[in-house]
Image: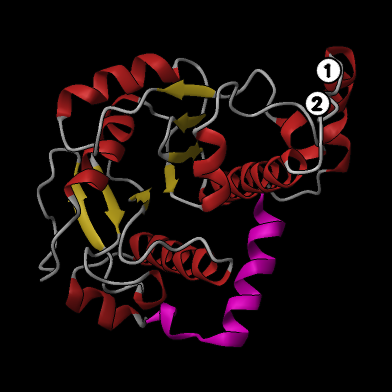
Amino acid sequence: MATAALEKTGIGEAEWEARQQLAACYRIFDMLGWSEMIYNHITLKVPGERNAFLINPFGLHFSEVTASNLVKIDIDGNKLDDSSYPVNLAGFTQHAVFHRHLSDAHCIMHTHTTAGMAVSSVAGGLRPTNFYACNFVGQIAYHDFEGVTVRSEEGERMIEHLGDKRAMFLRNHGILVMGRTLPEAFIKHWSLQRACEIQVATASMGTPLEVPDEVVAVHQRDLSKVAIPGGVGKADYDAMVRLVDRIDTSWRT
């Protein structure tokens, strides 16, 4: 958006860049089959504004989200723009508590994917039976299902159960991840989703082989050796944005 247009809307350049990054992410999730009707949420803090974040308009499918129709709210749920769209209370309640209390939770993603919900609904949760699952050994928190997340007091228990982790299975519910950047949260969600998909597939084939702890430790130690410069998840995320652009560029508006 041109500078003059940004000034007219009251949106600064940093916020507009964040809006485009988040809108692209919603389209990527839809392209990957991770949308859930008009539900589920990805939120992103507004740069330079401690208590403001962007969330999807309640009522729109992920494929309809654009940079301009994202809703800007504060951590108390007040709208900070003139959006005509409501905000899903479940999305606000769940995400605001982490944005409020965790300075490094710049981006938060919650989904109800089939594989994610399946793994969150079995005793033992995620097991170290595949490459991607080994990435998360010792890094996953669990929070018991208490019904739809609309009561603020549940947030206190979610923070307690999360502890120092930044990925959580909401039992019987789905995946919750967060990152210091949107690309970091994206690659974390992608990897966790792949781990779940493979675990579900493996479970139908017989007794899974679990990777020994000492091998998991070596695996996690060596993961940094296959990282490329630019920040965690950036190259992966940029590649997905290019794919989305080949389908539809309307998210940019």
**Residue ID for mark 1:** 217
SS for dot 1? helix
Q: Label 2 near label 1: C-beta < 8 Å?
A: yes
The percent position of residue 10, horizontal first and vertical second, equals 19, 68
Tell me the quarter of the picture where residue 93 sits.
top left
Q: How many marks?
A: 2
Q: In the image, is residue 197 above or below residue 127?
A: below
**Residue ID for mark 2:** 220
Q: In the image, is residue 251 above or below residue 111?
A: below
Q: Amino acid at mark 2?
A: Gln
The percent position of residue 42, horizontal first and vertical second, equals 39, 52
Where is the N terminus found, in terms of image quarters?
Answer: bottom left
Residue under the image location 16 percent in, 28 percent down: 152
Q: Residues within 10 Å of mark 2 (few under 14, many from 20)?
A: few
Residue 132 horizontal side relative to residue 240, left or right: right
Q: CA distance from mark 1 to mark 2?
A: 5 Å
Q: In the rendered structure, which segment of residues is drawn in magenta?
A: 232-253
Q: Amino acid at mark 1?
A: Ala
Residue 247 horizontal side relative to residue 225, left or right: left
Q: In the image, is residue 83 above or below residue 128?
A: below
Is any part of residue 232 visible from this angle?
no
The percent position of residue 217, horizontal first and vertical second, equals 83, 17
Tell me the quarter of the picture where residue 195 sits.
top right
